[in-house]
Amino acid sequence: MTIMEIVNPRIEAYLQTLTLERDPVLKSMEEAGNKRNFPIIGPLAGRFLYWLVASTGARRILELGSGFGYSAYWMACGMYGSGEIYLTEFAEENLREAEEFFRKGRIRSRCHFLIGDSLRLMDDVEGEFDIILNDVDKEYYPEVAEKAPLRLRPGGILVSDNVLWHGKVLEPNPDAATLAILDFNQRISEDPNLITTIVPIRDGLSLSTKRPARRI
């Protein structure tokens, strides 16, 4: 199929002109991603994550599928003062690179760089999170929909990337990855414990807020 542009390229170009000058480390990460054809969320979605962390006052963040840390770096920069952020990544070389970028950026938050299967690592980390960012392999999205909301505090937010999947969610004969994303989108939309919206930024970001427990 032809890959669909979720946002009109001219609109995206205009929004890029409104993006403030970025941290030199972020620029280095963007250059590394372009050079290696490594998918990153890019500055527009990155700034959205920064805004989300800053506006909610998030202090404890978990990222599922961190790559070399681009999204996590944006979120760490959005924390006022100190906080705690967990990066999880299967490829050790990516995580070591993330550590180096975080060191160069002098990130003040307490950072945990965990190597292995992100969903298994989530089981090993105790406590609730203010924000969980999901960017694992798409086939595992339904498992994220099942497990991640349980790890959010009431009012916490699950953010997921690629939920519009280059427009493939509209295909009549979706492949396995697309089917998994369709399943995920349906689950988070129907979950009575979540309030979900999908924002057509870049490749689609879903935002699911965990409802507070009902008082009896």
Image (spheres, rainbow, N blue to C red):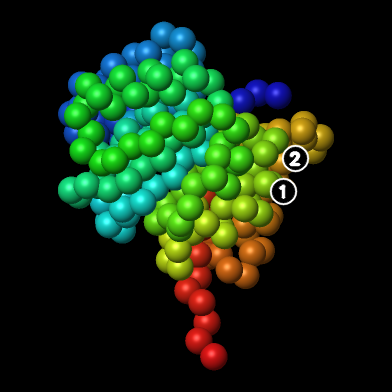
Point 81% across, 35% down: residue: 173
Q: Which residue is mark 2?
A: 179
Point 56% across, 26% down: residue: 90
Residue 72 in the figure: left or right of residue 115: left
Disc 2 and disc 1 in contact, CB within 8 angstroms? yes
Vertical relation: 206 (above or below) 89: below
Q: Position of residue 61 (x, y in %)?
A: 39, 47
Query: Could you tell me the amino acid type at mark 1?
Result: Asp
Query: Which quadrant of the rendered structure holds the C terminus?
Result: bottom right
Query: Which quadrant of the rendered structure holds the N terminus?
Result: top right
Q: Residue furthest right?
A: 173
- For residue 70, what is the image quadrant? top left
Q: Position of residue 187 (x, y in %)?
A: 68, 56
Query: Could you tell me the amino acid type at mark 2?
Result: Leu
How many C-alpha atoms fall within 10 Å of the one at disc 2: few (<14), some, or many (≥20)?
some
Vertical relation: 150 (above or below) 136: below
Q: Which residue is mark 1?
A: 183
